[in-house]
Amino acid sequence: MTTESPRVLRAPWRRATVRTRITAGVAALTIVGLVLVSLALYAVESRRIDRTVERALLQELEEFSGFAERAPSAGITGPDAVVLAFLERNAPDARESLWAFPSAGTPQFTGDVDVELQGSDRFAGTVEQLRASGGASTIDVDGTEYRLVVQPVTDGSSTAAFVVVQDVSAARSELRSLLTTYAVVALVVLAAVTAVAAALAGRLLRPLTDLRETAQAITGSSVSAQDLRTRLEVVGHDDVAELQRTFNAMLDRVEEAFAAQRRLLDDAAHELRTPLTVIRGHLDVLDPDDLEDVAATRALVTDEVDRMGRLVGDLLMLARSVRPDFVRRTPTDAAALTVGVLERARGLGDRDWRLDGTAAVHADLDGQRLTQALLQLADNAHRHTSVGDVVAIGSAVVGEHLELWVRDTGTGIDPAVADVLFDRFARAGSDDEGFGLGLSIVQAIVLAHGGTVRVDPVQVGARLTLVLPLQPGVAFTGV
C-alpha cells in the first residue's frame, strides 16, 4: 500500500501539460519566496518592536532618575511625593502608562490604561514583588501582553515604586496590520506572476506545440504530399529555434524519401507493366506440345525477366540516390580517375577511344560513383556511334570546379529531347533500346556531389560534361 501511493499522487502531475508544470513551478517558487519574505519581515519587525519598547522603558526610567535627583532642591521630599510629582509633570507616550505606587494608599497613574490592567491582581502582585529590588517583567492580562519596569524609591523608613508599562500587544497590532497588507499585496503579486508565467510559457512552448501538431499530422494514418510540405516557421536563434530548423531539415529528408518511394512505385508499375504483358501474352498462346514454341517462349521470358531485373536495379539505385550515404567522399586523384574510366571504356566496343586531357588535382569525391556515371556516358556514346567514330574522355579544372566529360562524333542529340534528356524513361531516340534511366542515374550521382550535368553545344556528335564543385582544401598537383 505504501509503495503505490506515490505513484497515484504523481500520476496527475505527469499527465499535466508542460505549460501547466512550468506555471505551477513558477507559482510554487513565488509562494515560497513570498512566505520567506513574510517570515523575515515578521522576525525583523518583532525585534524592532521589542527594542523600541525597551528603549521607551529605559528612557522613562532615566527621566525619573534625573527628576528624583533634582527633587530635594525643589522642595520635594519623601518617596511618595517624588513619584506623585513626576506623574503630574510628565505625559506618557502612546501605548504607555506611568504609575505611582506610594508606600501606603491607592496607586495613581497617567495615560491610557485598560480597565483589565487597572483591576488586575497579577499586575499589582508583580509590582509588589519588584517593589523592593526593582526590575522588569512581562505579564499577560486577559490576552494582552504588557512589558513593565519598576523603579523603587526609598528613604529608609518607607518605599514607593515608580512603574512604567508598555502595551506590547498594541504595538504588535501594527505589525499584524502590516502583515495583512503584505498578504494582500503578495496575493496580487502571485496572481500577476502566475498569469505572466502562463503567458510566457505558452509563448515559449508555442513552437513545440506547432512541432507536435505537425508531427501528429505527418504520422497520421493518411499522409499526403501536402502534409510533408508543411514547415515550421523559425523565429529567433535559441535552442527551440534550432530544434525547429532540425525538424524542418528532417522533414526535407522525409519528403525526399517519400517522393523517391512514390516515384519508385510509379516507375516500377509503369515500366514493369509492358514486360509482364509480353510474358503473359506469350504464355497464353504457348503450345506446350510444340517444343520449338516452348524453347522460343522460354528464351523470350528469360530475356524479359532479365530486363525487369535490370530495371528494378536501376530504380533502386535512383531511390538510394537521396540517401545521405549514397556518395562516400574520399581523396581522389582526378587524373587517375579519368585514365581509369578510359581504360574500362575500351572494352565497350571498337571505337577510336581518346584521352582529351586530365585534371592534375586531388579532391574529395566518390570515385566509384563517378566512374559509374562516366562509363554510363561512354556506353551511351558507344551505342550512338559506329566503328571508327571518336569517343573521348577528359577532365580539367575550370575555376572552382572540376569538369569531367565524354564526347563523341556520332549522331548527336536531338534538340527536341535535350531539355528532358535526364528525365526518367526519356530516350535519345526511337531506336534507343534502354529504359531511359541511365542518364537519370548519372544526374543523381552528380547532384549527390553538389554538381550539375551540362550538354555542351558541338558541331559534330555530342558532349556531356559533369561539373563538380571543388571542396575546401583541394590540393592542386599541377597546371
Image (tube, rainbow, N blue to C red):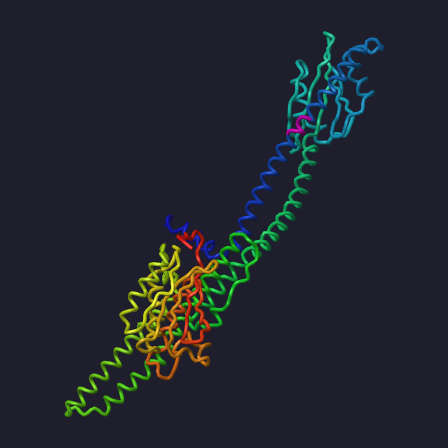
- Position of 323 with respect to 285 (left or right) is right
Magenta stretch in the rendered image: 47-51
For image coordinates 50% across by 67% down, the residue present is 230
**Picture coordinates of residue 461 (x, y %)?**
40, 76
Q: Is residue 429 above or below residue 474?
A: below
Q: Nearer the viewer, residue 42 or 140?
A: 42
Dominant SS type (magenta): helix
> In this view, which residue lies farthest toward the right?
74
* Residue that appears at 39% across and 52% down: 477
- For the C terminus, the image quarter is bottom left
Residue 78, image x and y in percent? 78, 11
> Which of the 4 image quarters holds residue 122?
top right
Residue at the image point whose x is 63% and y is 50% from the top = 192
Give me the residue at 68% from left, 30% from top.
168
Q: Is residue 356 above or below residue 271?
A: above
Asked whether 392 falls inside the magenta stretch, the response is: no
